[in-house]
Amino acid sequence: MSEEKSLNFIEEIIEEDLKNGKYKNILTRFPPEPNGYLHIGHAKSICLNFGLGLKYGGQTNLRFDDTNPVKEDTEYVDSIKEDVKWLGFNWANEYYASDYFDQLYDFALQLIKKGLAYVDDSSAEEIAALKGTPTEPGKDSPYRSRSIEENISLFEEMKAGKYKDGEKVLRAKIDMAATNMHMRDPLLYRIKHAHHHRTGDAWCIYPMYDFAHGQSDSIENITHSICTLEFIPHRELYDWLIEKLEIFPTKQYEFARLNMTYTVMSKRRLLQLVEEGHVSAWDDPRMPTISAMRRRGFTPESLRNFCEKIGVAKRENMIDFSLLEFCVREDLNKSALRAMAVLDPLKLIITNYPDGQTEELISENGPDEAYGTRTVPFSKELWIEQEDFMEVPAKKWFRFAPGAMVRLKSAYILRCDDFVKDANGKVTEIKCTYFPESKSGSDTSGLSVKGTIHWVSAQHAAQAEIRLYDRLFNVENPSSEEGDFKDYINPNSLQVIPNAYIEPSLKTAAIGTRYQFLRKGYFCLDKDTTADKLVFNRTVTLKDAFVKK
């Protein structure tokens, strides 16, 4: 009998809230800002928020925090929706903070009328100078004592477009001596004459994140607003605004965000990598974005399993990239189709096989019988891997060497008789004898061999470009190293094999189809594939082969 999985601290809170009747149903939300592509850290938040909704019979909203028109775009909105769906989740409602601009403006007016907000003409530098330090109280702005009537008038003028960017801001009037720096008269609105991806030029003032976030949660009647740990200092303001506005009392809870080795999680830094050409795009398979992982061949099941394994905690920690690869490998081992591909080819000629003859051999199509079988052409000349021949064999060498016998996968046992070298001493061809009675599935030869290798028929093989991906950085935590984080980019994070040989069945593969290339790893057909060129990405190796530097 399996042990019951213990609850994480957020599940404990929800179960207590449901038990004591605080809520009849729970409602969570996933609130990304559409200013970039989602990464694996967001996948953790998606799985948590949507997972809680599913587990407790509630719902989850998808809400775009689109309060900064300068950085946001519909391209990012579309990619975010695609990522959430790909991970296997459906949202109850699709909302935007911009849906609430009128309501948020009215909330701001309410605070002004209660004497809890004022218009400040100070520059950003002057506001910062008066803010104080964690050990010294701040000083009141010279505009803090404006009358309610004057503040209403000025705020309406801000909305009407009378002032330039940065000329005025709206601030909450709380306490310039507060221990929590976020409570020292925080900004609620700023002027930004910029075109918004949804509201166009209707607005030139935009709410700050701290003002829009909690109020949007409240408008939607979100029961559990789940954020990452960096929002702990913001919670006091979150609660203060809800209390003063006397609106639905949503509660904020914080969990540790995902930090992972050999990558960066900052959208700003990921954007740098894209804009400076260190990677090809947001979905470059070396990136930690969900779209990049999808393109590389990761499965949604493996990402969900990874998020479940790392759990939900209150303390920051660093997760090894190898754990994610393990989850991918574990899922692909059960689901990927099988095929043969030779990445570093060596010609093999069967000297006693009839010229011009082709056989269609039967090979398993997947990890079990449910996947059925496929036929693979076999002929006199084959391609095998260079690494499967050794002129002077090492101890316990079970592959080809002079006089050694090896089984070809789903085919015959062969004996290596001779080999040919070029002028540089490189082996370019090996000559073998095959044993007709040793055919896989009907072997009556009585021969016994320890090695089995993959191959493709030279006459029938298709060619493909193979892209081998590795970690993008060569240090565990590039963000914490001295100097520019980009100095630690792994120069070998992408290796391209322009002309590998693949079995002909792969010619009709669909973009995104995942395969285990026998003995070589897991691969996925890339979107760069054309009618003239197949392109496969290596998703992950068959086992963890990364060497820490």
Image (tube, grey):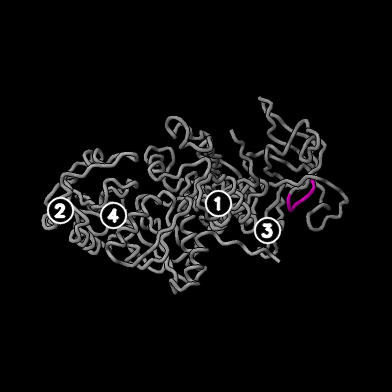
Q: Judge the density around disc 1: few (<14), some (14-19), many (≥20) Cα neighbours within 10 Å.
A: many
User: Residue 314: horizontal and vertical position, in percent?
Assistant: 50, 52
Count of numbered circles in the view: 4
Q: Give the residue pinned by disc 1.
A: 524
In the image, residue 86 above or below residue 393: below
CA separation, marks 3 and 4? 49 Å
* Amino acid residing under circle 4: Thr
- Residue at 37% over, 40% down: 275
Which residue is more in the foreground, 78 or 449? 78
Q: Earlier in the sequence, mark 2 or mark 4?
A: 4
Disc 4 on helix, strand or loop? loop
CA separation, marks 2 and 4? 16 Å
CA separation, marks 3 and 1? 17 Å
Q: Quadrant of residue 301?
A: bottom right
- Residue at 88% over, 51% down: 446
* Amino acid residing under circle 3: Pro
Disc 2 on helix, strand or loop? helix
Q: Which residues are magenta?
A: 409-414
Q: Residue furthest top?
A: 424
In the image, residue 398 above or below residue 40: above
Quarter containing the N terminus? bottom right
Q: Give the residue pinned by disc 3.
A: 367
Q: Give the residue pinned by disc 2.
A: 158
